[in-house]
Image (cartoon, helix red, strand yellow):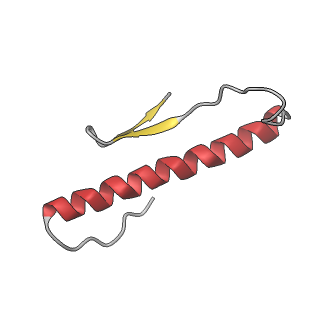
Amino acid sequence: MPLPNIDGNEDEKEEIIRESLGNFSKDLNSKINIEMTKKIGLKKQNRAINLPRICFDHDRMVLILH
């Protein structure tokens, strides 16, 4: 994932990076949900499926797989 071109002070740069990684984890979770639902062949409304979730830990600035 390419990070945006960042200008500004360190706080602004950190906020842009946090926002970019947070958006990346949301997009990735959406893609995982769609692909896993297709592969399993179940519709979400018919049955609960435990899918892996990717979360962005803002304090440690890492992506975590649950």
Query: Which residue: 77% across, 38% down?
Result: 37
Above-or-below relation of 51 to 56 = above
Above-or-below relation of 36 to 19 = above
Query: Which residue: 31% across, 73% down?
Result: 5
- Residue 45 position, x and y percent, is 80, 35
Image position of 26 (left or right of 22): right
Disc tally is 0
- Residue 63 position, x and y percent, is 40, 39
Image position of 32 (left or right of 45): left
Query: Which residue: 48% across, 53% down?
Result: 24
Above-or-below relation of 12 to 33 = below
- Residue 59 position, x and y percent, is 26, 39
- Residue 4 position, x and y percent, is 36, 69
Q: Which quarter of the rendered picture does the N terminus lie within?
A: bottom left
Above-or-below relation of 51 to 4 = above
Image position of 29 (left or right of 23): right
- Residue 58 location, quadrant: top left
As drawn, the residue found furthest toward the front would be: 45
- Residue 20 location, quadrant: bottom left
